[in-house]
Amino acid sequence: MKNKLVATGMVMLAVTLGAALAQDKGGKGGGGGKGKGPAAPGLAISSPDFQDGGVIPDKFTQAVPMPVSPKLEWTNVPMGTVSFVLIMHDPDAALGGMPEDVLHWMAFNIPGTSKGLDGGQPTTPTLPDGTVQAMNRGRNPGFMGPGNPAQNPYHHYTFELFALDTKLSLGPDATRADVLKAMEMHIIGKGVLVGRFKRPAA
Amino acid sequence: MKKTFLLFGIALAVLAQDKGGKGGGKAPAGPPMTLTTPAWADGTDIPAKFTQAEAMPISPKLDWANAPMGTVTFVLLMHDPDVSRNRTLDDQTHWIVWNIPGSSKGLPENVPAQATLPDGTVQGLNGGNVVGYRGPGAPANGPRHHYTLELFALDTKLDLGPEKSRADVMGALSGHILGKAVYVGLFHRPQ
């Protein structure tokens, strides 16, 4: 019994050390360790609807009256992922002179078994699989299409996918600050996708 | 009547923020501030000379234009949001620079790795605990990371020495941001 406990402790220590080292190296949590052979490839998020770093097509933006969310796909999911959080934001904006930027979409408790999100997600606070969609900056649940005015430089709509080792005990009324706080110490992988947009000239 | 004006004012402020949020949600200013580099096109791959694919990466030349009226200093942050450090929301800091004079139009290529520059600019420690610029170094076997350069135009100078952290700087600029501009480059190491 005592031996088993010690062994368990050693394994936990090794896992902790390995994770800490992996994060220093590149931070795609859950990978292998520094100087311990190749790390597992980091969580990757992509969309068939636009190229990473490229321009987001109009149908997903406020250039049309009813923008739909793009299809998203992810791979290299870390072992032990229980749920995902997706946060889409526009870092080009500084609201009210503060570092806070514009939140376009925040979904959490996306099942850890999922491989992505279909295009055109309904804008409801909860989805049948348990996914929760909180309020975006426009005070609506779900996806808010990019709306950067034509006279601006391209804004950089950043989709951040977090793999968590837990589910969040939060409802659709959760704020971005609530979700970020609840995620701390539970992030075992992260992947990012960027799409650029400004409205077509009038 | 007064109430109507007040409501109208609030509505305008909210609209201004939703529209792009450049600054305090006040009346629309001049043309928007831009941040660019001649080193790569926005949203595309960063050339090797600026990355850890080279033994001695150098910082890219940066240009900015249309700084808001009243800009006293700039803060430049380069970070890698693809990283979660130790399971937290902290990502990787590649470059944190503050008290860049408000009259400046950019930064030259290959800024020296010194805590203070002759014009008063301060460079803090990057995620590698080294002063100045840290070249992108995402591993070859994973996806490209999204190195995000964020330029903040401030209405003040920051009373922070080079020993201060990114968190200190972000805390100090709250309420002082007149404008913001972003530029993104992608990178992972060659196979």
Image (cartoon, grey):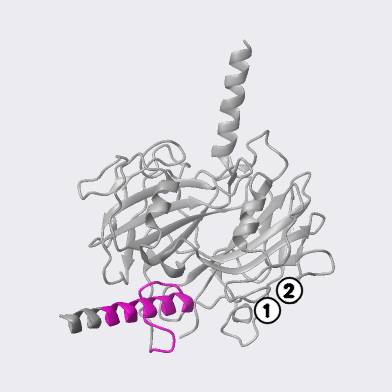
- Magenta-colored stretch includes residue A118: no
On the image, the x and y values in percent for residue A24 come to 48, 77
Q: Quadrant of residue B130?
A: bottom right
Q: Is residue A5 left or right of residue A75?
A: left
In this rendering, position of residue A28 left or right of residue A110: right
Identify the residue shown where x is 39% and y is 37%.
A140
Check disc 2 and report the residue beneath it. B109
Q: Amino acid at mark 1?
A: Ile
Q: Secondary structure at mark 2?
A: loop
Q: Residue furthest front?
A: A2
- Residue type beneath disc 2: Glu
Circle 1/circle 2 CB separation < 8 Å: yes
Check the picture and name the quadrant holding the C terminus of chain B. bottom left
Badge 1: residue crowd in 10 Å (few <14, some 14–19, many ≥20): many
Q: Please give the name of the residue rendered at 77% of the width and 53% of the height, measured from the top-left corner.
A: B157
Magenta stretch encompasses residue A22: yes
The dot on residue B58 is 1
Residue A47 visible at all: no
Query: Sequence-wise, which precedes: disc 1 or disc 2?
Result: 1
| Residue A18 visible within the image | yes
Q: Quadrant of the N terminus of chain B?
A: top right
In the depicted view, which residue is nearer to us: A194 or A93? A93
Q: Residue furthest right?
A: B118
**Which percent across, then down, holds residue A142?**
36, 43
Q: Chain of mark 1?
A: B
The residues colored magenta run: A9-36
Q: How many marks?
A: 2
Magenta span main SS: helix
- Tell me what residue is drawn at x 84 percent, y 69 percent: B118
The residue closer to the viewer here, A90 or B117, is: B117
Q: Residues within 10 Å of mark 2 (few under 14, many from 20)?
A: some
